[in-house]
Image: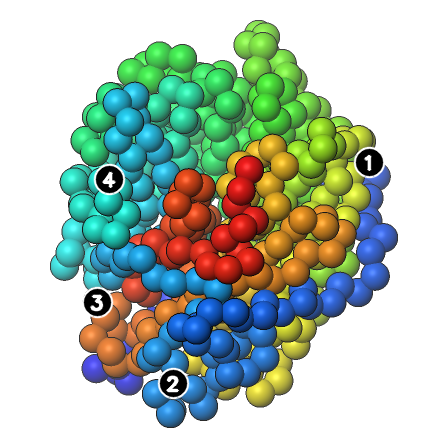
């Protein structure tokens, strides 16, 4: 069965990648280029735990030999340990939220690739999974959200902690109809209440939330739209701005909601030619001016750019930075892996790359070297690459967690912003024919933006091939979560 279904699955994955990487409509004026030298791999983690199971090949690699010998079945961990596991599938986001009564829940999407996973996940249930995390050693599923956007939110699932609203827009690897679903999770996070489900944007793919919870932003990506939805009354959302002809991906905002940090996936000269970071002034939308204008403050690209995914703001000693992540590789160019980086945004008119975060396995690029023989390495939407990174808190974080697809969950020490170093990792690859719901599943498929349980020194993430994980940090990694 595995042999029969793998070619069909690969054709679907290749078609999906083609949709994502199609021609864009983004024009760049005065594009800045990072002046960094050819980035090198981040120094590898030193495993200090007696129960660690270090990688056997270069940093981030799960070699074909490990599948043949059975070593891959044990997984790989360094300064990290599994606390809990739930389900058999995952997607692009893991959200952690504590409601007004003190209950803590996790939310994660279960549809990694639409429509493939709709078929296979139907066995256990579709949609966004709600977990009661009162005891993180024993997650309890309390609800499954199946309104239109929650069946396939793609990369848009977000919780606004100030207002206790869970939001998503219907999406897929290219784009989909812009149906926005809003849920109340502040009353009881275990039982989200659907407040509205409306066609509020032209198309959907990624998203962003203002800190005050009044504006949910939608990026249609391949659909070409940037849309602002006023959710002051979440039962009656209202579109207040929509721009077309742009190729925007992840949308993150400053604390006051007046500046947006946009991952731009490409331009009219080819999907990668002008990919990078765009800084937008969205103050007129935030101020709810009639017929608002959104203007460009600056643009930035870098030497190893692939497909920019998101740029998360944080501060260090009062200075402003972004944690930017690229997904996949530059398929239309030199096939380099974009991975992640830290960008100084103190002067939003002149952003600059401070350092890169990448693994040794990224150096060969997509489909090159002997690692191309590793299971999953030649699948364009899997492979050795990055997808999402996150920080545990906005003010003075010293640690970063990244989902790096075939390489699993990777954790980095950013105490020195100019010289990040790997501090921990956790990877539980799936073996071919291991009886998963997705018969062609192989290797890790870690795509989800990690969430943090700071008090317990835990990281939560999901793997598209194997489900939701709670991972405890150990040794030097654990110490970095002290605020």
Tag on residue 350?
A: 1
Residue 93 falls left or right of residue 3: right
Q: Foreground residue, 371 or 357?
A: 357
Q: Which mark is first along the chain, 3 or 1?
A: 1
User: Is label 3 in a helix, a strand or a loop?
Assistant: loop
User: Is label 4 in a helix, a strand or a loop?
Assistant: loop
Q: CA distance from mark 1 to mark 4?
A: 44 Å
Q: CA distance from mark 2 to mark 3?
A: 22 Å
The spot of residue 186 in percent (x, y) is: 29, 23
- Marks 1, 2: nearer the viewer: 2
Relative vertical location of residue 5 with respect to residue 265 in this rendering, above or below: below
Relative vertical location of residue 444 with respect to residue 114 in this rendering, above or below: below
The spot of residue 44 in percent (x, y) is: 62, 69
The residue indicated by pointer 2 is 71
Residue 79 seen in the figure: yes
Q: Which mark is first along the chain, 2 or 1?
A: 2
């Amino acid at each position: 069965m595995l042999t029969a279904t793998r070619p069909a699955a690969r054709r679907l994955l290749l078609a999906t990648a083609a949709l994502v990487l199609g021609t864009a409509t983004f024009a760049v004026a005065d594009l800045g280029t990072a002046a960094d030298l050819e980035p090198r791999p981040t120094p590898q983690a030193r495993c200090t735990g007696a129960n660690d199971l270090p990688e056997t090949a270069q940093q981030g690699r799960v070699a074909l030999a490990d599948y043949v010998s059975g070593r891959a079945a044990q997984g790989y961990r360094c300064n990290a340990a599994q606390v809990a596991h739930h389900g058999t599938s995952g997607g692009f986001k893991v959200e952690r939220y504590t409601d007004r009564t003190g209950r803590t829940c996790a939310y994660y999407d279960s549809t990694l690739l639409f429509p493939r996973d709709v078929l296979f996940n139907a066995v256990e249930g579709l949609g966004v999974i709600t977990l009661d995390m009162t005891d993180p050693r024993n997650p309890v599923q309390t609800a499954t959200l199946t309104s239109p956007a929650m069946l396939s939110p793609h990369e848009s699932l977000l919780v606004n902690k100030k207002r206790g609203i869970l939001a998503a827009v219907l999406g897929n690897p290219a784009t989909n109809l812009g149906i926005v679903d809003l849920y109340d999770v502040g009353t009881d996070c275990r039982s989200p209440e659907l407040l509205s489900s409306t066609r509020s944007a032209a198309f959907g793919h990624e998203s962003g939330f203002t800190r005050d919870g009044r504006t949910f932003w939608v990026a249609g990506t391949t659909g070409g739209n940037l849309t602002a939805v006023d959710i002051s009354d979440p039962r009656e959302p209202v579109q207040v701005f929509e721009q077309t002809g742009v190729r925007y991906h992840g949308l993150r905002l400053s604390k006051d909601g007046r500046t947006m940090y946009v991952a731009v996936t490409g331009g009219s000269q080819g999907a990668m030619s002008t990919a990078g970071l765009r800084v937008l002034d969205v103050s007129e939308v935030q101020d709810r001016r009639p017929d608002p204008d959104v203007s460009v403050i600056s643009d930035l690209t870098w030497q190893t750019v692939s497909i920019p995914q998101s740029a998360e703001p944080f501060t260090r000693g009062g200075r402003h930075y972004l944690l930017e992540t690229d997904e996949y590789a530059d398929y239309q160019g030199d096939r380099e892996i974009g991975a992640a980086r830290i960008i100084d945004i103190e002067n939003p008119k002149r952003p600059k790359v401070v350092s890169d975060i990448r693994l040794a396995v990224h150096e060969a690029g997509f489909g090159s070297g002997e690692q191309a023989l590793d299971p999953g390495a030649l699948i364009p939407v899997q492979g050795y690459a990055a997808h999402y990174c996150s920080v545990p808190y906005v003010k003075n974080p010293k640690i970063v967690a990244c989902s790096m697809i075939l390489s699993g969950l990777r954790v980095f020490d950013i105490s020195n912003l100019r010289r990040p170093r790997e501090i921990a990792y956790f990877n539980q690859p799936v073996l071919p024919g291991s009886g998963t719901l997705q018969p062609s599943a192989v290797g890790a498929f870690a795509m989800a933006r990690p969430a943090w349980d700071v008090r317990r020194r835990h990281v939560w993430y999901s793997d598209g091939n194997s489900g939701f994980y709670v991972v405890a940090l150990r040794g030097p990694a654990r110490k970095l979560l002290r605020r």
